[in-house]
Image (tube, grey):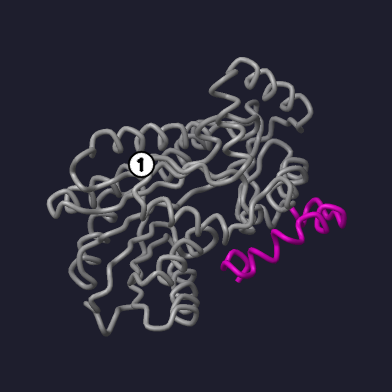
């Protein structure tokens, strides 16, 4: 979608990975706070659906979309250049794009790490290199990266994910220090599990059915996961305020603090939890929807009801 009324005089926010899920909610929140939007993802159809949803929910907003792989530095640079040419200077840039791979160490392969690092570490690096120099030249800007509690504590069955998120935490915290006094801020956003419907978009390996059976309910049940709309609002609050770090959920706050105070105890607890989770050595990667179909469990489907509802609202289940 090419904007027809830009520049509008409204501040411009760029959200990488905003075609569905949490990214779409973050973009919606920024639009409601008066920003025009530039959003990207790798899938053109999901971008078109997201743009239609944004314009319907946020009257008067201008939405620019572009197919862009955040792992590709040239594509990210082109996206930023096009945004500033058509909408105006980017005041806010938030990297949300991510992938979830769930499986045991025995089935983990090099490509799992490569895929995770490409999206969730090179993605923020590429966006920071494209947008922050423009912000510092103007003397103002807000940059944020959605990391994860998995970037503070490495839980079992999510090793490639955590490796990438640990890197993203280091990048954003380091940028916060580097940018002090420039008028540009960098916010490390640390959520826990959120109900976005992402369990159907995640990938599972090493007995995919059993991995899905524990992860999908954990990402859907209220005591374990947070309402994603509320999480998105807190994220935008933190980035616009220029906070260096935002621990979004009570679970992320507690886990981060416990790990800081007692790291050995935390690691032993993670090891104990890993003993109870399913194993398997098959490297076959199974998409969440297919894993759910293979599992065929009414109990698990019932436990993921809230997550499925969230997914329908956030373009995860178009």
Q: How many labels were placed on the picture?
A: 1
Tell me: residue 312, above or below residue 17: below
The stretch of residues the image draws in magenta is 292-318
Instruction: Identify which residue, 8 or 164, lies in the foreground.
Output: 8
Q: Position of residue 26 (x, y in %)?
A: 46, 61
317 is within the stretch colored magenta: yes
Mark 1, Cα crowd under 10 Å, few <14 / some 14-19 / many 20+, is: some
Helix, strand or loop under label 1: helix
Q: Position of residue 19 (x, y in %)?
A: 47, 65
Magenta residues, dominant SS class: helix
In the image as oriented, which residue stretches furthest toward the left? 137
Answer left or right for 42 relative to 230.
left
261 is within the stretch colored magenta: no
Q: Position of residue 234 (x, y in %)?
A: 50, 54
Q: Residue at x 87, y 54 (%)?
A: 299
Q: Position of residue 111 (x, y in %)?
A: 49, 36
Instruction: Identify which residue, 266 or 198, lies in the foreground.
Output: 266
Tell me: residue 307, above or below residue 184: below
Q: Quadrant of residue 303?
A: bottom right
Residue bearing the label numbered 1: 122
Q: Quadrant of residue 43?
A: bottom left
Instruction: Identify which residue, 144 or 205, lies in the foreground.
Output: 144
Image quadrant in which the C terminus is located:
bottom right
Tell me: residue 317, above or below residue 297: below
Q: Residue at x 43, y 69 (%)?
A: 44
């Amino acid at each position: 979608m090419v904007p027809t009324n830009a520049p509008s005089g409204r501040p411009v926010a760029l959200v990488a990975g905003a075609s569905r899920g949490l990214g779409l909610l973050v973009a919606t929140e920024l639009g409601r706070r008066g920003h025009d939007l530039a959003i990207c993802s790798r899938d053109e159809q999901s971008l078109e659906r997201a743009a239609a949803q944004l314009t319907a929910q946020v009257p008067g907003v201008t939405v620019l979309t572009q197919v862009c792989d955040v792992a590709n530095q040239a594509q990210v640079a082109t996206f930023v250049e096009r945004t500033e040419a058509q909408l105006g200077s980017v005041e806010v840039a938030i990297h949300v794009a991510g992938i979830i791979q769930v499986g045991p160490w025995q089935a983990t392969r090099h490509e799992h790490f490569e895929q995770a690092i490409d999206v969730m570490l090179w993605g923020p690096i590429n966006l920071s290199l494209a947008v922050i120099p423009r912000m510092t030249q103007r003397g103002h800007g807000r940059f944020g990266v959605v990391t994860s509690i998995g970037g503070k504590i490495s839980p079992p069955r999510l090793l490639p994910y955590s490796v990438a998120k640990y890197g993203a935490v280091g990048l954003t915290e380091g940028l916060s220090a580097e940018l002090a006094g420039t008028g540009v801020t960098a916010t490390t956003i640390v959520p826990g599990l959120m109900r976005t419907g992402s369990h159907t978009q995640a990938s599972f390996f090493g007995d995919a059915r059993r991995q899905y059976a524990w992860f999908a309910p954990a990402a859907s049940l209220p005591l374990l996961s947070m309402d994603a709309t509320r999480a998105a609002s807190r994220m935008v609050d933190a980035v616009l305020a220029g906070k260096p770090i935002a621990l979004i959920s009570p679970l992320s706050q507690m886990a981060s603090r416990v790990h800081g105070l007692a790291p050995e105890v935390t690691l032993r607890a993670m090891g104990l939890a890993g003993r109870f989770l399913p194993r398997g050595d098959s490297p076959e990667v199974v998409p969440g929807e297919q894993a759910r179909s293979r599992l065929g469990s009414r109990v698990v489907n019932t436990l993921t009801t809230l997550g499925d509802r969230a997914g329908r609202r956030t373009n995860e289940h178009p």
